[in-house]
Amino acid sequence: MSKRGIGEILEDMIDSIERITAYVENISYDEFTADLKTQDAVIRNIEIIGEAAKQLPYNFTVAHSDIPWRAIAGTRDRLIHDYSGVNFDIVWAVIVNDLPSLRARLIEIFQSEKNSNEKQS
């Protein structure tokens, strides 16, 4: 298995955020909590975001310490290991309050990484 680059990892995170955004577009919290398929799709993509965050090199996360990498990975861990249930109030708050700004920041970093790599080529 080849080691994935930072750009690929960031793309996975951005893609997962965009999927979540599409899944919950034009639905209310009540509709979300009543729709098991949407819940499962959102939770799966939050897990992907958290797992991807864990794959980023330490020096990269330190260089971008404005992003709460540990909390992102921790959210994934709680979803994976908490078999008793998911707090959908928290999931919805993450969707509404955290993911839009995280997406914007990840795109900014991705573009910066891409430009830096192009200059080195």
Image (cartoon, helix red, strand yellow):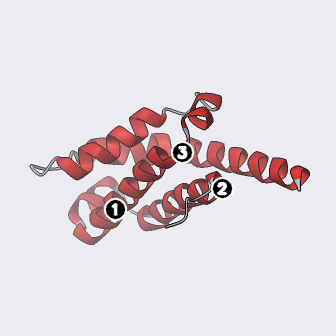
Left or right relative to 36: residue 72:
right
In the rendered image, which residue does mark 1 sit on? 44
Q: CA distance from mark 2 to mark 3?
A: 10 Å
Q: CA distance from mark 2 to mark 1?
A: 21 Å
Under circle 2, the secondary element is helix
Q: Position of residue 105 (x, y in %)?
A: 64, 42
In the rendered image, which residue does mark 3 sit on? 56
Left or right relative to 47: residue 109:
right
Q: Are marks 1 and 3 in contact (CB under 8 Å)?
A: no
Q: Position of residue 39 (x, y in %)?
A: 28, 62
In the rendered image, which residue does mark 2 sit on? 7
Quadrant housing residue 109: top right
Between residue 22 and residue 42, name the one nearer to us.
Answer: 42
Q: Position of residue 71 (x, y in %)?
A: 40, 34
Under circle 1, the secondary element is helix
Mark 3 belongs to which amino acid? Leu
Between residue 37 and residue 55, name the one nearer to us.
Answer: 55
The quadrant of the picture occupied by the C terminus is bottom right
